[in-house]
Image (cartoon, grey):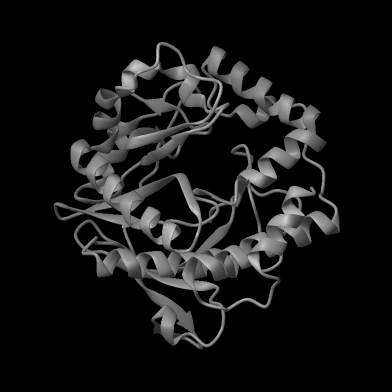
Amino acid sequence: MTSVKEFQIDDAATDTELGRGSFVFTDDYSVFDWGKMPDQIPEKGASLCTMGAFNFELLESEGVPTHYRGVVENGEVVSLEDASRPPWQMAIDLTQVPDLPNDGRKYDYDHYHDAAGTNYLIPLEIVFRNEVPVGSSLRSRTEPSDHGLAFDTWPDDPVDLDDPIVEFSTKYEESDRYLDRAEADAIAGRADIDALAELAREVNRIITDQADSAGLDHQDGKIECLYYDGEIRVADVVGTFDENRFSYEGTQLSKEVLRQYHKRTQPEWVQAVETAKAEAKRDGVADWKALCTREPESLDDDVLETARDMYCAGANTYTGLELFDVPPLSSAIGAVRRL
């Protein structure tokens, strides 16, 4: 189980064969790597399943291999087009996810790959960026010249990129950290790091084109991948408002809305999270949450309703399918702006 969806395993993967199973999407949400937050957002799970299925079918139509098999309705696996209602369950091929031991200071990736063989989930997130917004961690970690940009220092305004930036970060560590190419290559195991970067660029292109056609701006996102018998396939879920950042008429249309709302309304908790992560990094401690001195508070009902309309109206607009009974996206975004 992840913080926002559950696994159903029908046939477990083996060293040599993919398994069969599904994701069951919940209405839970997560911000700041916290995991499951106190509240649920109505129909959020169905909106993410809808967008994820739409994007997987789009990727497959463009020749990108994935682990997607369809959505589940009444026990049958069908295409999104054939679903009669917003789906909650997505059928997928399963790969192996070995244990990643840590001694409180260091993660043992050798153990992971010794157990993985040639059929495993690559323990990386491959991040792509079409824009560098103000406040992006990229600005504090790198210089413009590192990316071939003609600035001596980062400007005060967002930077639109002609060529997307691709980065690698950890997936299974308690707190995500960005990696240089050499460390990412080692963590990827048998998977080729250049092939992963190229696959991320292709996924980004396809999602960006779809967003453009729907009147949305696609700013950044990530993919996760599996390695099976020498082939890399896109896994997990791709191109949703949790995995990617989109905007509509200059307003965020993504989980970033909830991040920023918590920063404004629960700054003490956000600061406690940042302090705990910094302390854990300084002391080489894997479990930063054990060091956090505060818990997040619940959101008001009107905030949850605004988030629900944002997710569902955004899914309708992006896919062109009117699966959710919600106000138009322009109204949903208006409510977001008033938060």
| Residue at left offset 31%, top offset 67% | 19
Does residue 29 appear to the left or right of 2 in the view shown? right
Q: Position of residue 183 (x, y in %)?
A: 29, 25
Residue 311, percent across and down?
Answer: 62, 61
Image-based side of 297 in relation to 248, left or right:
right
Could you say where residue 268 lies in the image, as x and y percent from the top left? 80, 27
Residue 192 visible, this angle: no
Q: Residue furthest left?
A: 230
Residue ID at (24%, 60%): 64
Establish if 301 lies above or below 261.
below
x then y, percent, for residue 40: 72, 59
- Is 308 drawn above or below residue 217 in the view shown? below
- Left or right, residue 337 beside residue 73: right
Quadrant in the rendering for residue 331: bottom right
| Total marks in image | 0
Q: Nearer the viewer, residue 92 or 118?
A: 92
Res 327 visible: yes
Q: Residue at x 38, y 19 (%)?
A: 144
Q: Residue at x 49, y 32 (%)?
A: 176
